[in-house]
Image (cartoon, coloured by chain):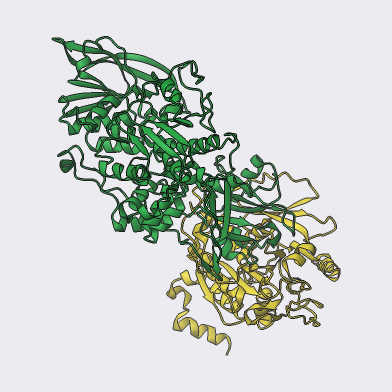
Chain colours: A yellow, B green
Amino acid sequence: MTFIAKPKVAHPSLPRNTLGLTRRDYEGALSTLCAGCGHDSITASITEAIWGLSLEPQNVVKLSGIGCSSKTTAYFVSGGHGFNSVHGRMPSIAMGANAANRDLTYIGVSGDGDTLSIGLGQFCHAIRRNLDMLYIIENNGVYGLTKGQFSASADIGTKAKKGETNVQPPIDPVLLAMTLGASFVARSFSGDKAQLVPLIQAGLKHRGFALIDVLSPCVTFNDHEGSTKSYAYTREHYEPAVHADFVPLEREISVDYRAGETVPVVMHDGSRILLRKLDAAYDPTNRVSAAQQIQERMRAGEYLTGLLFVDENAQHEFHQVNSTPAAPLNSIPYEALSPGSQGLEKILARYR
Amino acid sequence: MEPTDTSHPDYYHRVVDCQWACPAHTDVPEYIRLIAQGRFTDAYMVNRHSNVFPGILGRVCDRPCEPACRRGRIEQKPVAICRLKRVAADHRDDVSARLPQIPTAKNGKRIACIGAGCASLTVANDLMPLGYQVTIFEQYGEPGGLMRTNIPSFRLPAAVLNEEIAMISGMGVDLRLNTPVSSMRELLGSGGFDAVFVGSGAPKGKELKLPGREAAAANVHIGIAWLESVAFGHIDKVGKRVLIIGVGNTAMDCCRTSLRLGAESVKVMARKPRAFFKASAWELEDAEEESVQIVVNRSPKAFVLEGGRLSGMLFDRMEYDVDDAGRITAERVAGEEFLPADDVILAIGQENAFPWIERDLGIEFDKWDVPVIDKTTFQSTRAGVFFGGDAAFGPKNIIWAVEHGHQAAISIHRHCQGEPVAERLPPGMNLQSRKMGMHEWSYSNDYTPVERRLMPHVSIKERFKKLNIEVELGFTAEQVEQEVQRCLNCDVQTVFTAKLCIECDACIDICPVDCLTITHNGTESELRARLKAPAKNLAEPLYVSAALPQTARVMVKDEDLCVHCGLCAERCPTAAWDMQKSELKWPHAADEPRALPAQPAKKIA
C-alpha cells in the first residue's frame, strides 16, 4: 500500500509508440497491493506489452474476478474498459463481451484461487470454447487476501508462513490447459520481464485462448524459507525451455537466427513469434511430448518456463466455430440482427 | 563497473546539484525546506554559515546553483534558489543572538586584511570567533568593496549591505576606513601582524586604446570606475545618448545606471552574437525590460570627435561563421557604422592590480603580473601572505570570493598555529533516515508541477524616479509557498543496501522517471546505453550496487533525473532502499582542532 501519489513527471526521452504514446500513458491507478508483490511487476509487464503493441487504450478490455490479482486490472491502461466480476466468473463475462464485440482486445487477470478453486469450471470451459482472450494467472500458491492459506496450486511439501506443510497435490493450470486443447500455453515469472513482456504480446495477438501462468511471489505470506513459490526458490528452480520473441507486423525480422535453434511462428495477422529453444530436446509444437516433459521436470522440482505450447493453426476459435460475421455483433443494426416477426415464424417452423 | 563508493562524501554531495555547484556549498535544499516551514531565521542562518551574505547574495549572486538545478533538467526552469534566499533574508528576525560569540580573551594573533570587500569580511567572520584580532584596511570611507562601488543600489540597497557588513564589523573588527595600504613592505615590516590577507579585488577596468580615446577622454568612462563615482555621488548625470562597450554584467549595471542618470537612448554594443554574451541571462532580461538596446556584431573602431568633443563611435560590422558546436570558425568585416553618442562607457573587463606590492618581498608574480597563489591554501609564495577573492585569480563573483575567504581563514589559522597550511580537514558526510513510520517520511515528497514563479518588479515608470529604488520587489507569500515546493529535495538521498534486495522489481516498476534498472554488470558506456531509460547525461554519475544476492545482477541508478519522490523506498518490501538526508560537513576554520581558545575547566559539582 502506498500513500504517495506517483508524480506525473516523466523521463523526457521516454520512447513513444506508433500512436505517439509513452509507457506512462498506459498506466492505471497506483497499486494498493503489498510493496514487493509480484503482481505489480506483472502489471508493469502488461503495461509495457500493450504500449509496445500500440494498442489504443479504448480498444482494450480488462476483466477480472476476485482476489489480489483481480485488483490489478485497475493498475494498467486506465483508458480501457474494465469489469471486476463475481469470484471465479470472469470467463463468463469475457465470453459475453467477446461475443458482442470481437474487435476488442481481451485480457483477463486472475489468480490461483480465482482460477483453480472457485472458478475452475469457468476456466476449463473458456479454454474448451477457445475464447479469443489472453488469460493471465498470477500464481502465488496462497490466498493472500485472506491471510495466506494454501491455494489449489500449492506444491506438496511447501511450508506456510506459520510452518504447516501442504499435503494435497496441486492443480497445474499449464498441464490442465494442455489436456483441454489450449492452443497457446505459457509459463513465466514476474521477476523476468525479458521473458514475460514478449509472451504477453504474443498472447494478445494469438487468435483463441492464450494462457500465461505467471509465478508471482506473495511477498507477505509466501516468500519465506520452505516455500516453493518464493522469489529465491523460483529463481533457483526455474528453467526457461523456450524463449519467445514477438515480432510485430510492421517490423522485419532482423534477429539473426540459426535454423534448428529458432523457429518462426506466423500468427493469423501476419506478425510473428520467434521461438528460441533453450532446451534442445523440447518441442513446443508437440502437445504430447511437451506435456510429458513438463510433467517430468515438475517431478524433478523445476518450473519449465517460456512458451510451452503453441498451435497457430488451430481452427476452433469461438467465432470461427460459430460462423459469426466479421463485423462485431454490436455494430450490426438492430434491423439486420433481429429476424422480425416473419423471420421468427420461419425459425420456429423449423422446430415444429 | 565497480560498486559505487557512496561512503566518499563527494558521491551524495554531487547528487545535490545546487550545493555541488555552489562555490561555498550552501545547503540549498535544507534552507528551502526551512522557508517552507516559515522558519526564515533558521533558513537565513543555514545560508549565513556557508555564504555569509545571504541578503546580498539573495539579490545579486551569480547563481551557479540555478543552471545546475535538477529541476531545470526535468522541466527547463530551475528552482528560483536565489530569490528564495532573499525571502529568508527579508523575513528573518534579529539574528544578533545567533551570531558566533566573540571571546574576550584573544589568542594573541593579529591578522591584517587589505580591502573591506566580501573576501576580507569572510576572513574576519571566520577568525574573530576564534580569538584572532583582525584589522581591515579600506581605501574608501565605507566598507563593502565591489559590492558597494560596482553594484548599483537599485539592485542592492545600501541598507541590506550595511546590515550584513555590520554583523561582521560588530564582532570587534578593527576596521580602518580611508586607509589605503600603499606599501606591502611597510605593512609586513611593521611587525604588527602574524598574517596578511589580500582581498583588494580586481579594481582596474580594462582600457580600449583606439583613435580618439585621449581627445575624447572627458566623455569616455571606464565602467567600474564610473559606477564607483556614481555610488559615491561624484557623478549624477550622463548624456542623452550613451553607448556601452561590452556585454558582461558590468555593462548591464552601466546601461541601467545611465537610464537613471538622464540618458534617453542607451545602446549596449557587443562584438559577437548573443550566444557569446558574458552577462547572466537574467541581467540581460532586466536591461532589455528597461528598453536598453543590445546591438550585436559591432566591433569598436574609433572614437569620433566634433569640435573637440565626443560625437559618437565608429564600428566595424562583423560577420561570423559558426560551426555545429557553436564555435566561431571565421570572422570578417562587412562594413562600417557610425553611431552618435554623448558618452561612451567601457565595460570590457577588469583585472587585479598590485602597484603597492613591492616585487622583492618573496611574493612571486607570473608573466601576466598576477600573483602566484596556491589554489587550495590561497597562500602566496611568501608564507603568511594570503590572497582571496578577485585579487587571487582575477574577476569571478561574490560567492567565489566568500569561499576563498573561508579557505584562506583555515590557512591563516593553521599558519598562526604553526601547522602546515596544506594539511586540511577532509569534507564529511552524514546520512540520516527520513523514515518515520510505515508510510511516513519526514520530508515533503509530493512532486508539484507548478512552474517557476516570476519576480515582481517596480513599474517601469516608477523605478526611474530615483537612483536607488530597488527594482525587484521580492516574492509574495503566495509565490514563496509555490516556489519552495518546486525543490526536489535532492539531499534526501536514495540509499541502497544490496544485501537486502530480493529483486522483486517493485522500485523499478514504480519509479516515475525510469532511473532504476536491475541488470547484469558491464562497462559504464555500455551500461549507460541499456538502462531502462538511456543515461545520456554523462555529467551525472551512475550508481552501481554490489552484486545482488539472488542473481548476482546489479542495481543501477541514473542520478540524472531522480525526483527524490521516495517511491522506490516506499515500495521496497525489505527496506533495501531508504531515503536518507545527506548533510555535507564542509570544514571551516572553526572546525579545525584547537580552533577555540582554551576555556577554563568547568567545575563539576
Q: Is residue A296 left or right of residue A324?
A: right
Looking at the image, is B596 positioned above or below residue B353?
A: below
Q: Nearer the viewer, residue B181 or A73?
A: B181
> Outermost residue toward the bottom?
A352
Based on the displayed image, in which of its 4 quarters is residue A228 positioned?
Answer: bottom right
Instruction: Determine the residue located farthest toward the left in the rendered image.
Output: B307
Q: Is residue B220 left or right of residue B331?
A: left
The residue lying toward the viewer, choosing from A322 and A217, is A217
Q: Is residue B141 left or right of residue B505?
A: left
Q: Is residue B360 above or below residue A239?
A: above
Which residue is located at x 41 percent, y 32 percent?
A: B113
- Find residue B120 and report its horizontal and vertical position in percent: 41, 35
> Residue visible at 46% across and 40% down?
B132
Residue B450: image quadrant is bottom left
Percent position of residue A76, x then y: 54, 65
Residue at left offset 79%, top offset 81%:
A166
Task: Give coordinates of residue B109: x percent, y percent.
Answer: 48, 37
Taking the image as drawn, is residue A50 in sight? no
Image quadrant containing the N terminus of chain B: top right
Q: In the rendered image, which quarter contains the C terminus of chain B?
A: bottom right
Q: Quadrant of residue B233?
A: top left
Tell me residue B83's x, y (percent).
34, 48
Residue B77 appearing in the image: yes
Identify the residue shown where x is 33% and y is 39%.
B282
Of B595 and B460, the residue lying toward us = B595
Between A28 and B383, the one nearer to me in the picture: B383
Q: In this rendering, is residue B275 above or below A64?
A: above
State the count of labels. 0
